Amino acid sequence: NAGVMQNPRHLVRRRGQEARLRCSPMKGHSHVYWYRQLPEEGLKFMVYLQKENIIDESGMPKERFSAEFPKEGPSILRIQQVVRGDSAAYFCASSPEYLQETQYFGPGTRLLVL
Amino acid sequence: AQKITQTQPGMFVQEKEAVTLDCTYDTSDPSYGLFWYKQPSSGEMIFLIYQGSYDQQNATEGRYSLNFQKARKSANLVISASQLGDSAMYFCAMSEESFGNEKLTFGTGTRLTIIP
């Protein structure tokens, strides 16, 4: 059973470009969480999604950031017009329907904005 | 709002000794979960142990145990017989059980270094 998969593992973008980060949850998991980790800090919650629904986006910046989890395919975290402050590690976690406290993390995507 | 506090930014421990990593929390929710994750230098987040707020017994997983003191709002991680491979960042986290949303709030972490 494959774990949570994230790609790319490393992403370099210039200021103003778009970044797309993908997350495939573990098989059978229908809940996806995105977290951001700035250098030397803990993880901060961004958004919680179920299939085709955003449940909680209270941690996501209001502008430039969006997330989706379509019926088919991976969850996508999209950052438009990236700025240097977006440089961070972005982690996705997934959990099953009935054991939501058990979140399994992907390896993360390290975004570097030049 | 929930808050997790880890007061030890870094610790150095001799190999084979036991380690206690401190974690205190603050919440008004009666029902919550407490977690510890390990983040080695490679960067992935590895789940170590979970404690539910209503669990009577302290959680244990191999060499890891969680010293849960509800009245003090503390959830310290104890690693017995430390090994060189235990060197990593350790994060304490908490979930709130509201409307089925189990988003985690993390502390700032403790960097543990095991000395041979």
Image (tube, coloured by chain):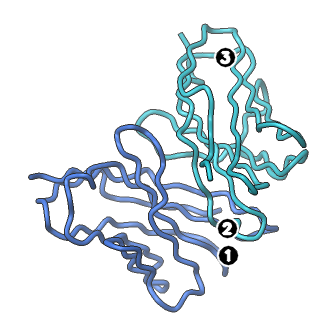
Colour of chain A, in one word, is: cyan
Q: Give the residue number, with chain letter if any, for mark 3.
A: A82
Nearer to me, B103 or A5:
A5
What is the chain letter for disc 1? B
Q: Give amino acid for label 3.
A: Val
Cβ atoms at labels 2 and 1 below 8 Å apart? yes
- Could you classify mark 2 by the number of other residues whose Cα lies within 10 Å: few (under 14), some (14-19), or many (20 or more)? many
Q: Where is residue B86 in the image (x, y as percent from the top left)?
A: 27, 55
Residue A10 lies, with reference to residue A66, above or below; the image says above
What distance separates the C-alpha of mark 3 from that of mark 1? 36 Å
What distance separates the C-alpha of mark 3 from that of mark 2? 31 Å
Residue B21 lies, with reference to residue A59, above or below; the image says below
- Could you classify mark 3 by the number of other residues whose Cα lies within 10 Å: few (under 14), some (14-19), or many (20 or more)? many
Residue at 73% from the left image edge and 49% from the top image edge: A32
**Residue sticking out furthest to the front:** A1
What is the chain letter for disc 3? A
Q: Position of residue B113 (x, y in %)?
A: 21, 50
Q: Give the residue number, with chain letter if any, for mark 1.
A: B29
Q: Position of residue A42 (x, y in %)?
A: 48, 46
Residue at 70% from the left image edge and 62% from the top image edge: B102
Q: Give amino acid for label 1.
A: Asp
